[in-house]
């Protein structure tokens, strides 16, 4: 049961970054992923960041992140999800739910995802919770995504450096100290699963913001 809870919390913590008060401190390097943490102003949940290099171009990674049909293949505890509204080619409102292990209540979220190209050439995806009329009724507890960010930096030979900053509140009775402990491994678990998914034969290429 502890193992199931650990996997569940890995997913719950998958989405967010907030207003930070300190510098990033490196705490681990494993499976080609560097992991950092720092405290967050006004929160007892620590923020984490993972940095790694994919042997794949940005277009393929973005395709996997946007692919709802196969999301269950690589996202722990994925229950269901849908695009509630498209607000342009690179902005959409997304609903996603997770099937958490007993006795933890299932979780879900409604968030705005916006992809953009930065002046330095990086592609960035920002995500945050929003109120959306007509959103599905929660399956149990609604997660608060204060802010979430992927940053994709193109490298030579078609490779991509990917950074993920995460800080979110799973809500409910889960102890904050336990969430902090579990999140230390989250970037590693996420990137290992994502790298495997990107290599699958059906993966296409997504347009990128210009």
Image: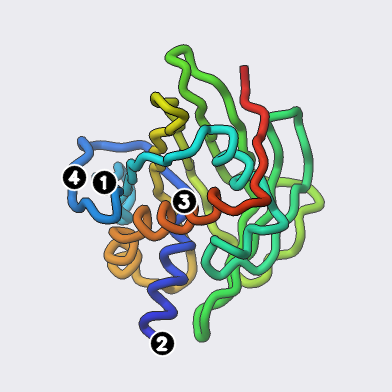
Q: Earlier in the sequence, mark 1 or mark 4?
A: 4
Instruction: Measuring from the top left, give residue 80's x and y in whole percent.
Output: 69, 64
Q: Residues within 10 Å of mark 4 (few under 14, many from 20)?
A: some
Q: Residues within 10 Å of mark 3 (few under 14, many from 20)?
A: some
In this view, the residue in front, 136 or 172, is 136
Q: Residues within 10 Å of mark 1 (few under 14, many from 20)?
A: some
Give the left or right position of residue 3, taking residue 141 as reference: left
Residue shown at 43%/33% (left/top)? 160
Q: Earlier in the sequence, mark 2 or mark 4?
A: 2
The disc at residue 34 is 1
The disc at residue 109 is none
| Secondary element at image label 1 | strand
Q: Nearer the viewer, mark 1 or mark 4?
A: 1
3D distance between C-alphas at marks 1 and 4: 7 Å
Residue under label 4, please give it.
26
**Label 3 near label 1: C-beta < 8 Å?**
no
Residue shown at 63%/58% (left/top)? 71
Residue under label 2, please give it.
1
Instruction: Measuring from the top left, give residue 161's x and y in whole percent.
Output: 39, 34
Residue under label 3, please give it.
195
Displayed quadrant of residue 24: top left
Instruction: Measuring from the top left, give residue 198's x and y in whole percent.
Output: 54, 48
Q: Earlier in the sequence, mark 4 or mark 3?
A: 4
């Amino acid at each position: 049961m502890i193992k199931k809870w650990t996997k569940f919390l890995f997913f719950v913590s998958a989405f967010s970054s907030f207003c930070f008060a300190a510098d990033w401190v490196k705490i681990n390097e494993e499976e080609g992923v560097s992991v950092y943490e720092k405290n967050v102003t006004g929160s007892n949940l620590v923020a984490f960041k993972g940095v790694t290099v994919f042997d794949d171009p940005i277009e393929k990674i973005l395709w996997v992140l946007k692919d709802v049909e196969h999301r269950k293949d690589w996202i722990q505890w994925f229950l269901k999800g849908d695009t509630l509204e498209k607000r342009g080619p690179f902005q959409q409102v997304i609903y996603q739910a997770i099937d958490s292990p007993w006795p933890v209540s299932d979780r879900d979220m409604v968030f705005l995802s916006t992809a953009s190209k930065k002046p330095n050439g990086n592609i960035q995806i920002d995500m945050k919770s929003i109120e959306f009329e007509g959103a599905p009724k929660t399956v149990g507890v609604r997660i608060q995504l204060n802010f979430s960010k992927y940053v994709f930096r193109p490298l030579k030979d078609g490779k991509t450096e990917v950074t993920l900053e995460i800080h979110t509140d799973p809500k409910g009775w889960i102890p904050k100290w336990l969430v902090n402990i579990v999140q230390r491994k989250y970037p590693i678990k996420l990137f290992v699963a994502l790298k495997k998914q990107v290599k699958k034969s059906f993966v296409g290429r997504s347009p990128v913001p210009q």
